[in-house]
Image: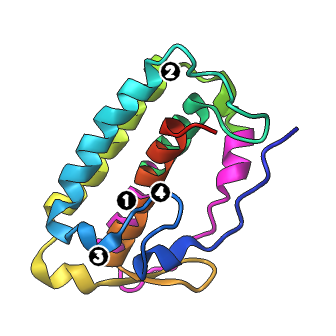
Amino acid sequence: MTITPDNKDWTWVLERPCDECGFDATSYPRESFAEVIRESAQQWTLVLARDDVRERPREDKWSPLEYSCHVRDVYKTMGGRLARMLNEDDPVFPNWDQDETALEDRYELQQPELVGDELVDAASSYAELFDGVTDEQWTRPGTRSNGSRFTVETLGAYGLHDVVHHLWDVSTPN
């Protein structure tokens, strides 16, 4: 069985807590984004050290390794979007098909140690961007390919949900 692609629009997590993982965007002030990103990257390195890192808990759910690859790519994608928002006027982001990326990049075959290094590097770069955001920049806009509008602040909270949610995914019994 293959993984069913996730086609939900998760932007609602900016308005109310996530029913699944409990993430509440109001619990993460913008000044905490860089620290939370760095801390979560360290948690992901622990996930990658697990004995069951390559095992899918169910045929229709990613393994801890596959989730880790996805989170690495979330950091890269969100970092690129944040950089554009800080340097361009109201950029429009191309669609990123996370499920297609997982298939094309063969997440299940990647090496956990390398993924860990890449994840920490991507998280560090992303966090450094947030370290440099000025008060005036938090409201700079950007638009996702489906028309969803973000500010630097809401993009940060939205990206944090993805990472927190997937830590929940690899930590809860299925």
Amino acid found under the numbered disc labelled 3: Glu
According to the picture, the residue beneath numbered tag 4 turns out to be 21
Q: Give the range drawn in magenta.
A: 76-103
Q: Residue 160 carries which label?
A: 1
Is residue 89 magenta-colored?
yes
The residue mark sitting in front, 3 or 1, is: 1
Q: Can you say whether 44 is above or below 83 in the image?
A: above
User: Crowding near pointer 1: few (<14 within 10 Å), some, many (20+)?
Assistant: many
Is residue 117 something that shows in the picture? no
Q: How is this picture coloured? A: rainbow
Mark whose residue sits in front, 4 or 3 = 4
Q: How many labels does the image show?
A: 4
* Residue type, numbered disc 4: Cys
Q: Quadrant of the N terminus?
A: top right
State the residue lying farthest toward the top. Answer: 51
The dominant secondary structure in magenta is: helix
Which residue type does callout 1 highlight? Leu
What separation in Å lies between label 2 and label 1 (alpha carbons)? 22 Å
Question: Position of 124 compared to 90: left or right?
Answer: left
116 or 77, which is in the foreground? 116
Counting residues from the N terminus, which is met first, the one under dot 4 or under dot 3? Answer: 4
Q: Residues under labels 3 and 1: Cα distance?
A: 11 Å
Q: Is mark 4 on a helix, strand or loop?
A: loop
